[in-house]
Image (cartoon, grey):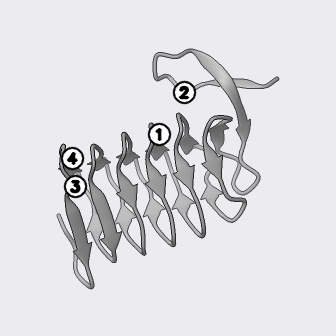
Amino acid sequence: MTTFDFEDGNGPVPAHRHVNGGGWVADTSRLANTVYVGPDARVFGYALVFESVKILDQARVYGEAMIYRKAQVSGAAQVFERARVLGRAKISGSAKIFGEAVICGEAEISGSDSFSGKTRIYVCQKKGRVQ
C-alpha cells in the first residue's frame, strides 16, 4: 500500500498519484480520470472532483470540498471544508474558499481573497473578476 503525508496533521495516509497529471490524491477522495491534477497539486480528505476540472501548481483541495464542471484551482489556492467551485470559475493565487462558500459561473477569485461562512455565499459572475 502506498501512503503520502499531506501535512494536515494526519500523518501518512493511503494515497496514489492521479492518472492524469500525477498529483497526489488520498484514497478517500473521489476524482474522475478526466480531472487533471498537476504533479505538485494535492487532493485529500473526502474531496470530490469531477468532469473537466484542473488542479494546478501547489493548489490544495480537501475536506469535503467539491469541484466540478470546468473549474480551475491554481497557484497556492485552497478549497476546503464544504466549499463548492463549479462552472468555469477560477481560483488562483493564495485564495481560500471554505465553509459553505459556492463559487460558480465565470467568477475569478485571485490574490489573497477568502470566501467562507456558515451560510452559503454565492459568487457567480458572467464576466469580470472578483479581487
Q: In the rendered structure, which disc, 2 or 1, sits on the residue that comes first in sequence?
A: 2
Say which of marks 2 and 1 sits in front.
1
Which disc is residue 120 wearing? 3
Say which of marks 4 and 3 sits in front.
3
* Image position of 34 (left or right of 61): right
Badge 2 is on which residue?
A: 6
CB under 8 Å between discs 1 and 4? no
Residue 101: tell me if it is visible.
yes
What's the residue type where badge 2 is placed?
Answer: Phe
* Image position of 105 (left or right of 63): left
Q: CA distance from mark 2 to mark 1?
A: 10 Å
- Label 4 crowd (10 A; few <14 / some 14-19 / many >=20): some
Residue 39: tell me if it is visible.
no
What's the residue type where badge 3 is placed?
Answer: Arg
Q: Secondary structure at mark 1?
A: loop
Badge 1 is on which residue?
A: 62
Relative to 129, does residue 25 appear above or below in the rendering? Answer: above
Relative to 107, does residue 55 appear above or below in the rendering? Answer: above
- Label 2 crowd (10 A; few <14 / some 14-19 / many >=20): many
Q: CA distance from mark 4 to mark 3?
A: 8 Å
Classify the position of the N terminus by image quarter: top right
Which disc is residue 116 wearing? 4
CB under 8 Å between discs 2 and 1? yes
Say which of marks 2 and 3 sits in front.
3
Q: Quadrant of residue 42?
A: top right
Q: Secondary structure at mark 2?
A: loop
